[in-house]
Amino acid sequence: IVPFMALAYVLLAVIAVLMNFDKIPSVVHMILQSAFDFKAIFGGFAGSALVIGIKRGLFSNEAGMGSAPNAAAAALTSHPAKQGVIQAFSVLIDVVVCTSSGFLVLFSMAYLGLGESKIDGGMPLVQEAMREYYGSFGIHFITIAIVLFAITSLIGNYYYAQANVKYLTNSKFVMNLFRITAVAMIFIGSQMNLKLAWNLADLTMAFMATTNIISLLLLGGIVNKVLKDFNTQQKSGIDPKFNASKLGIKNAECWD
């Protein structure tokens, strides 16, 4: 259901932009002015803008964190590079969805402080923007979409964690303890202060990203072999088939 909700969300954003076609020049001007003014440039040099961008980018698409490979590994494919390309494409889709949110807000009166209510930011601002464009339907749509995105994210991350726990141990006690902890964390997270939740998420994701980047560096040679093999077969006009033994890659029994 997530792909359909994302497609509908992007479509509504496009319609909203077209409804405010006359505002495009001023919005583009505002984006460029905000990006290249003294404050933004100084913030970029200081690293603050870069850090915030990395934080929110990681939270949005998880690129480089090493979580998505848990799902990718379950895919049935003839060559690992095929799934790698799909995973890379998913980051682009995420950028499109996030950009849609940005345009929804930038074209709204709420962002300019001219709406009926004063909102600092976050999801309430997106909801207010949707209300401007589509009335009560917009609020209900964005609320349902966020709930569905949240539920599917919880299910996905639970699957990732459970698969890794099972890899470490088959103990029923450990598995039940993990399940209880997972449910408890969902409840605690829903009651937690939003700023604290963001900070904890940033901290834990930093650990994940650091671990994964080290792994990527260690596996860089193997990745290069796999990608070269994929490109070579594609250029030959054949459907790429992976053979770990042929490439001299060890401990890849699942591909034998």
Image (tube, helix red, strand yellow):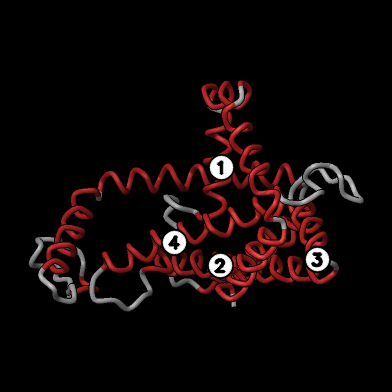
CB of mark 1 within 8 Å of CB of mark 4? no
> Considering the image in quadrants, where does the N terminus appear?
bottom right
Disc 1, SS: helix
Q: Earlier in the sequence, mark 1 or mark 4?
A: 1
Residue 12: quadrant of the picture = bottom right
Q: Residue furthest front?
A: 22
The residue to which callout 3 is attached is: 139
Q: Earlier in the sequence, mark 2 or mark 3?
A: 3
Residue 66 vertical position relative to residue 41 in the rendered view, above or below: below
Give how far across and how far down residue 217 sits, in percent. 28, 44
Instruction: Answer few, some or many: residues within 10 Å of disc 4's Cα (few below 14, many 20 plus, some between 14 and 19).
Output: some
Depth check, mark 1 against mark 2: the one in front is 1
Q: Residue at (58%, 71%) from the top-left corner?
A: 7
Q: Is residue 116 left or right of residue 51?
A: right
Depth check, mark 2 against mark 3: the one in front is 3
The residue to which callout 1 is attached is: 55
Q: Nearer the viewer, residue 27 or 60?
A: 27
Q: Amino acid at mark 1?
A: Lys
Disc 3, SS: helix
The residue to which callout 2 is attached is: 158
